[in-house]
Image: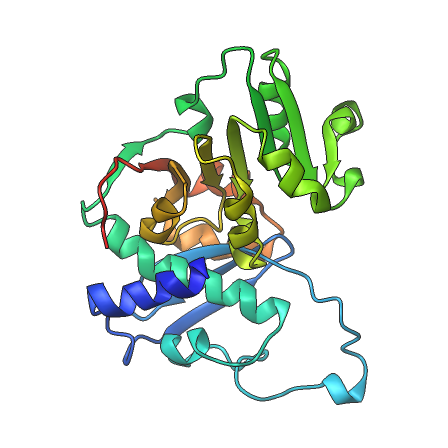
Amino acid sequence: MIVEQTYNLLKRKYGYGFETLLISDVTIGLHLTAVRLSDKSIGTSTTLADTLPFCAKVNRDFGDFTPLRFKGQKAKDLLETGKISATISSVKMAVLNAISSTIISSGSYSIIENCDPIQLLDLGSGKTITIVGAFQSYIRKVSSTGNKLYVLEMNENSMAPEHRQFFIPADDYKKILRVSDIVIITGQTLVNKTIDDLLSAIFPKAKVVITGPSSGIIPDILFENRVSIVGTMRITNPDIVFDIVSEGGTGFHLFEYCAEKICILNDGGSQT
């Protein structure tokens, strides 16, 4: 799977100090999760919501990687834990993104600064464009171009009423992705582990973008799996990231106050 392969690549190629790298700070907000590691790197992720009835006594847990048990733990232990929960998935992705941020900034990748992926797409008419996730700003932009638009989403109510004409149930992804010329995917699919099935269903010649606050992992494995552009961010004001996340901030709040958009391009070379 892509997330696991990326973690293994980080260990194998970059020799990152996984044995000593610690989780220094964690904030789990309504929409975003943020972590700071002991090397001062910061990563973010979408916050997934657990659906299990945690009020039941059998589900109570006060062990590792529960509230008050993240800070001070080794990043490696979290990334390799067998525990499964929405919270752990969110923090794991934020940790992977924090580790990756240092490597992405090292100059090994083709990066366009202050750029949103949609600026790099040819949106001339006559295309079939699919957006995976209710990206409201992307839906507005694409719907005004005259292209055929599909929006794959679990919950139709997460879309603005005027955009619901483009709604396609997420379970229909195989049929829709096979006929799409451009596919824009939310980084949340990395967190909930649906990214692998999505990418395997995409027409080989399609232009594929993955973007959002969760998409900050090193892109090598994504590039090997049909992704053309990764839209992520560079933190510019780390002092206020955790305040924004704790106050219910979303990705556009980060871009307004403490981060800038970057695009990582698949230039055809292999980093692996």
Image quarter of residue 13: bottom left
Q: Residue at x 52, y 39 (%)?
A: 202
Q: On the rendered image, what quadrant is the C terminus found in? A: bottom left
Q: Is residue 39 visible?
A: no
- Which quadrant of the view contains residue 38? bottom left
Q: Position of residue 164 (x, y in %)?
A: 78, 28
In the displayed structure, 167 sits above or below 94; it is above
Query: On the rendered structure, is 7 left or right of 129?
Result: left
Q: Residue furthest left?
A: 107
Q: Disc count in the image?
A: 0
The image shows residue 17 at horizontal and vertical percentages of: 24, 73
Picture coordinates of residue 122 (x, y %)?
44, 17
Relative to 17, is 268 above or below? above
Q: Nearer the viewer, residue 221 or 43?
A: 221
- Above or below, 36 relative to 167: below
Residue at (42, 22) in percent of width and height: 119
Position of residue 59 in the picture relative to residue 138 (left or right): right
Q: Which residue is rendered at x = 22% and y = 41% of the image?
A: 269
Q: Residue 67 location, x and y as percent?
A: 59, 78
Q: Residue at x 35, y 76 (%)?
A: 22
Work out whether residue 33 or residue 257 is closer to the camera in this orientation and state it.
33
- Asked whether residue 269 is in view, the answer is yes
